């Protein structure tokens, strides 16, 4: 290999780096290292002038290697790779060194930060001498999308993709689409009827010629890679033929078995064969085998089948397994709410008039268990109601993060109580976070409705006589308050779904410490994931309100459409490969690969890597006992050169 001609570029990043690191000194130091023919510092290397500076030097100095000492490669490595490519240099001859997060942001000692920046830059230069030009490949994109989850996020994503002319399969595990939003009464800050907003979109989904709706179904397995996903879907037997059912409701009316309604959050009973709510899509019931007398062996019932004039009900059906091909996947599986255990300090499950937010939504809803009337367990209109914010949110014992929707939802609850009763309303809050468009105005409006705002978290709910007593600190008065009320509404934390870990495993997604699915980049790629072609929409990625959920879903749809419209996707060449003569067929790498990118060739008795699935994580390389696994762009000699470069710095 001829002697490399390397250019080194040290970024000030405004003052993010230069405040702590002497960037001019780092650039001067780099000039004297082997192979470096030009070394410069610049205020913002990622800016257009900064990129043009690199491109100009590549051409004028004949550079065949570039080292950029700046911020995280995760943020700007593609930026500098594109700049190099536009100047005629292979993008994989660009090496990035992180002197922001790893130097300037971890110490206030300028001398130490500068010394470390020199060592890291020396390390990058050492690797740049050994970097090799790599060529990318492309994979074709099947122009068909899978959307998983039928809440407002999944609905919005499916409609956006379908409106662009692409086929969509929308998979929902429940018997109807609509998700949590279908349970709401009104939405803040405009107080629109939730059903009035949601129902037309639900109908549009079922009527759209480009959307295939699979309700009461779950994704069991995902194979393949971006552009060519093979997805195994289980259609659970609902025992009601959707093509024959007329939605007349005779089966539900005659069914003798009743259980607590999940849709009404346990506040009412439903039949074993029932439709979740009046506007359900599809508008056909599901037979719940866990409570049905026929399936539980309680009786040879089948009354529903006998009264069904359309002959739509049959028993003992088997699940149907289908395999579908997709180019892209949008995961929109939504959220759960924290449900305080019985007997805790807030009295949930202990006192009948303590409700969580979703239960209150159902009580307030005209189609809910009380037809929209707010009444206590005694059947009386409450004289006083307490709304407690941040139950489980911003609490190190439960969920440390803010759930974002709680303040505004609590204000809405107060308004609805005032609208429907003559009760005094007390809001116990830590502080008010009315961050969205029209939210502060809504807060001001509620203040004018005579609500009693108590700045302090409702710490405990007890009972004295016929009254519930909310105990909490009033921070403004500096006293402990005990407020007697007839009803308590706990606005509990939004949290990741109970089955989030299973979903993550199915789609090879990453989860944060709090259980939400991890985005590729919090600022620049909030809807993308580490799995190419799999996108996140809505509250599966984190707490958000309806407008933000719809916007996020639209972004995920746009990302999916970009791939399908392009028809192909460039694949990174930074992937593992097998030196077959060294492979002993031990299969250790197969079990350790988090992306299922490695299979086993039974004829050759060697491991085989599907390059399109490999993400270059290096787990197989580190675990291989015979050094048969190698990683392009991170070969052993390159890593060793980096280590030597650190010590030479």
Image (cartoon, rainbow, N blue to C red):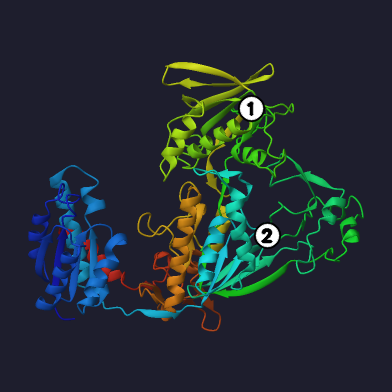
Front residue of this view, candidates 514 and 193: 193
- Residue at 67 percent across and 56 percent down: it is 174
Residue 32 screen position, x and y as percent: 7, 65
Image position of 388 with respect to 151: above or below: above
- Position of residue 440 measured from the top left corner of the image (x, y, whole percent): 41, 38
- Residues 179 and 203: in front is 203
- For label 2, the residue is 281
Question: Looking at the image, can residue 171 be seen?
Answer: no
Q: Quadrant of residue 6?
A: bottom left
Q: Residue at x 72, y 52 (%)?
A: 278
Please tell me which residue lies in front, 13 or 396.
13
Count of number-bearing discs: 2
Mark carried by residue 487? 1
**In the rendering, at what x and y percent does residue 287 appear?**
79, 57
Mark 1 nearby-residue class (10 Å; few <14, some 14–19, many ≥20): many
Placement of 433 over or under 566, stated as above or below: above
Q: Secondary structure at mark 2?
A: loop
Label 2 vs label 1: CA separation?
A: 33 Å
Asked whether, in this view, residue 637 is left or right of residue 119, the answer is right
């Amino acid at each position: 290999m001829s002697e490399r001609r390397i250019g080194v570029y040290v970024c000030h990043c405004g003052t993010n780096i230069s405040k702590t690191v002497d960037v001019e000194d780092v650039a001067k130091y780099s000039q004297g290292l082997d192979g470096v023919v030009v070394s410069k510092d610049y205020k913002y290397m990622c800016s257009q002038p900064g990129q043009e500076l690199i491109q100009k030097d590549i051409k004028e100095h004949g550079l065949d290697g570039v080292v950029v000492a700046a911020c995280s490669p995760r943020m700007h490595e593609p930026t500098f790779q594109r700049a190099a490519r536009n100047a005629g240099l292979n993008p994989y001859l660009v090496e990035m060194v992180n002197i922001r997060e790893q130097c300037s942001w971890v110490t206030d000692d300028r001398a130490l930060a500068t010394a470390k920046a020199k060592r890291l830059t020396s390390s990058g230069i050492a690797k740049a001498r050994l970097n090799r030009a790599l060529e990318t490949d492309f994979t074709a994109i099947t122009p068909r999308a899978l959307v998983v989850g039928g809440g407002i996020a999944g609905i919005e994503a499916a409609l956006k993709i379908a409106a662009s002319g692409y086929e969509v399969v929308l998979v929902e595990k429940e018997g109807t689409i609509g998700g949590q939003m279908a349970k709401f009464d009104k939405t803040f800050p405009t107080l629109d009827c939730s059903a009035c907003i949601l129902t037309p979109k639900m109908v549009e989904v079922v009527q759209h010629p480009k959307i295939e709706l699979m309700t009461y179904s779950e994704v069991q397995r995902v194979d393949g890679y971006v552009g060519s996903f093979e997805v195994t879907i289980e259609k659970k037997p609902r025992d009601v033929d959707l093509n024959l059912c007329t939605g007349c409701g005779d089966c539900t009316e005659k069914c003798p078995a009743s259980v607590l309604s999940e849709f009404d959050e346990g506040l009412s009973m439903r039949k074993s064969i029932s439709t979740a709510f009046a506007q359900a899509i599809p508008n056909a019931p599901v037979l719940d085998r866990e409570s049905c007398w026929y399936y539980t062996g309680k009786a040879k019932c089948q009354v529903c089948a006998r009264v069904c004039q359309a002959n739509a009900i049959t028993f003992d059906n088997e699940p149907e397994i289908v395999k579908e091909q997709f180019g892209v996947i949008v995961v929109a599986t939504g959220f759960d709410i924290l449900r305080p255990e019985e007997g805790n300090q807030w009295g949930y499950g202990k006192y009948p008039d303590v409700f969580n937010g979703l239960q209150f939504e159902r009580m307030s809803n005209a189609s809910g268990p009380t037809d929209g009337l707010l009444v206590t367990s005694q059947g009386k209109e409450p004289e006083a109601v307490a709304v407690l914010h941040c139950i489980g949110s911003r609490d190190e014992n439960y969920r440390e993060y803010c759930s974002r929707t709680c303040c505004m939802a609590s204000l809405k609850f107060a308004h609805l109580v005032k609208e429907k009763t003559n009760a005094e309303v007390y809001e116990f809050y830590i502080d008010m976070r009315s961050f969205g468009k029209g939210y502060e105005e809504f807060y001001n409006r509620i203040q004018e409705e005579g609500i009693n705002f108590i700045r302090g978290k409702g710490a405990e709910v007890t009972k004295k006589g016929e009254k519930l007593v909310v105990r909490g600190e009033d921070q403004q008065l500096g006293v402990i308050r005990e407020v007697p009320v007839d009803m308590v509404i706990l606005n509990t934390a939004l949290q990741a779904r109970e089955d989030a870990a299973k979903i993550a495993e199915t789609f090879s997604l990453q989860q944060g410490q709090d259980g939400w699915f991890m985005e590729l980049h919090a600022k620049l790629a909030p809807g993308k994931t580490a799995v190419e072609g799999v996108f996140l929409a809505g509250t599966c990625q984190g707490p958000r309100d309806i407008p933000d959920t719809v916007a996020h879903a639209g972004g995920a749809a746009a990302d999916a459409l970009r791939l399908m419209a392009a028809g192909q996707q460039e694949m990174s060449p930074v992937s593992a490969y097998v030196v077959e003569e060294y492979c002993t067929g031990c299969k250790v790498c197969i079990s350790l690969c988090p992306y299922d990118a490695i299979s086993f060739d039974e004829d050759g008795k060697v491991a085989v890597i599907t390059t399109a699935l490999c993400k270059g994580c290096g787990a197989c390389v580190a675990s291989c006992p015979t050094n048969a696994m190698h990683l392009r762009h991170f070969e052993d000699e390159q890593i060793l050169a980096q280590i030597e470069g650190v010590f030479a710095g």
